[in-house]
Amino acid sequence: MSVERFEVEAGGGATAAAEALRALAPAGVSVSGTVNEIVASVRTRGEQALLEYVERFDGVTGALRVSDEELQAALAQLDPEVRAGLEVAIANVRAVAEAGLAADKLVELPQGQTVTIRETPVRRAAIYTPGGRNPYPSTVVMGVVTARAAGVDEVAVCAPGGHPTILAAAALCGADEVWRMGGAHAIAAFAYGTDSVPRVDVIAGPGSLYVQEAKRQVSGDVGIDGFAGPSDLLVLASADADAALVTADLVAQAEHGVGTIAALVTDDAALADDVAARLAAGQEGDAATAVVLASSIAEGLLVAEAFAPEHLELVGAGAEAVVDEVRSAGCVFVGRESGTAFGDYVAGSNHTLPTGGAARFTSGLSTRQFRRRMSVVRIDGAAGALAKAGVPIAEAEGFTRHAESMRVRENPPR
C-alpha cells in the first residue's frame, strides 16, 4: 500500500497539510447533466419514466414495492448471528437518537408575549441504501431507526437489487415500505411522487455519485441529509498509541475503496515510521493512506480541524487530552479501544456522517434531519408595546400595510 508522508512545522502549515491530504483523493467527474435529464423526466412523465429507468438500471420488470410477505420471509431466513448483531445495533442507535429529541420550550418575553419553540416530525421519509456487490444492512439501521425515533409517520427504504439481507434489516427496523429501485430515478420518484410511489418530505442515506447529485438537484423541493462523498478517517495519536491498532483502523477505513483517505497525524517520529511501514507492507488498495508528522499534538489538532474529518480518532494520552478542543469532525472516537468500525455498526452513534470536509459546518444524521422547528406565538397583551417598536421598522422598510396591521392593535379592546 502506497503511503504519503508530510511534515508540519511549528507555527504554520496545518492548513496546507490538510489541503494536501484532501488532494490525495481523485477529482470527481461531473454527472450533473445526466442526472438532470433523469430527474426532469421522472418529474414530468412520472410513472412511465420511472418504470423505464427501473428496468434499464435496476433490472426490475415486476412490482417495484416489496410485499410484506417477502420482507417477513427474508427476515425468517436471516442468519441468527447477523440478526442478533443488528438487534444490538438497532437498540443502541435508537437510544442515542432518542436522546437528541428536544422538548417544547416556552419563552416569555419582556413585553408580555410568549413564543413556544416546538419540534414536529415530518410525515414521510425515504432511506436510500446503496446497491452494489455487497449489502449494507447497517445503513438501513442508521436511517430507519433514526427516522422512527424522530417520530416520522411513514418510512420507506430504497433497496436497489433487493438483497435478502437488506429486506430482512428493513423488516427488523420496522420500515413501512421497501422499493426495488435505486439511482437518480429513485430519488426523483421520492422527491416528486409517481402513480405508485408517494412523495416524501426527507430523503437520507449514502449512495453513488448519481444518487448524491440527484439529492442535490431535488433539495429545493425535498429535505435531504447532505451530500455523501468518499469516506475518510484521521487518527491523531501521541507517542503512547499502539501502532498495530492505529494501523488496523487505517487499513479498515481503506476498505471503503476509491476516494477514501485514511491518515495518521502524530508528533512522534517513531510512531509515524512504524505505522507507515505497517501500511506499506499491507495489501494494495484503491484508498489513499498518509502519515503526517506534526511538531506537537496541538499542531496536529490544527491539521485535524482544517481537514474536518468524517471520523476522528484520538489515541494516546496526549491526543485524548484535546478531545474538548475538537470542533470540526463528524464523529470523534476516543481511546485505544474506540475503533471507528464500532461506530459503523454497533456503538450507537450514527455512521451517516459529513464527508469531504463538510464537518466544518454540518452534522451527521440524527433526528434533526427528520424534524422541523416551528414557533408558536401568542402576543396577547403585548401588542401595544410591540407595535411601538415594530411600526417604525416597517415604515422604514416601506411596508406601510405591515405598519398599519400592528398600529391597529396598539389599543386593543378591553
Image: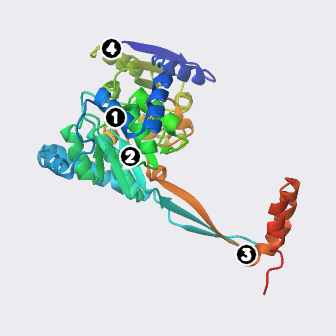
Q: Which residue is mark 2?
A: 126
Residue at the bottom extreme of this rendering = 414
| Image label count | 4
Asked which secondary structure carries label 4, the reply is loop
Residue 18 location in percent, x, y?
A: 54, 23
Residue 85 location in percent, x, y?
A: 21, 46
Mark 1–mark 3 Cα distance, whole angstroms, equals 53 Å
Vertical arrangement, residue 118 with respect to residue 122, above or below? below
Q: Is residue 71 left or right of residue 281?
A: left
* Mark nearer the N terminus (2 vs 3): 3
Crowding at dot 3, Cα within 10 Å, few <14 / some 14-19 / many 20+, comes out as some
Whether residue 334 is visible here, answered yes or no, is no
Which residue is located at x 71 percent, y 73 percent?
A: 379
Q: Which residue is mark 3?
A: 112
**Marker disc for residue 182:** 1
Crowding at dot 2, Cα within 10 Å, few <14 / some 14-19 / many 20+, comes out as many
Asked which secondary structure carries label 2, the reply is strand
Q: Amino acid at mark 4?
A: Met
Instruction: For marks 4 and 2, give the one nearer the viewer.
Output: 2
Asked which secondary structure carries label 1, the reply is loop
Which residue is located at x 34 percent, y 17 percent?
A: 286
Instruction: For marks 4 and 1, give the one nearer the viewer.
Output: 1
Mark 4–mark 2 Cα distance, whole angstroms, equals 38 Å
Mark 4 and mark 3 in contact? Answer it, CB < 8 Å: no
Work out whether residue 37 or residue 4 is closer to the camera in this orientation and state it.
37
Q: Amino acid at mark 3?
A: Gly
Q: Is residue 170 left or right of residue 73?
A: right
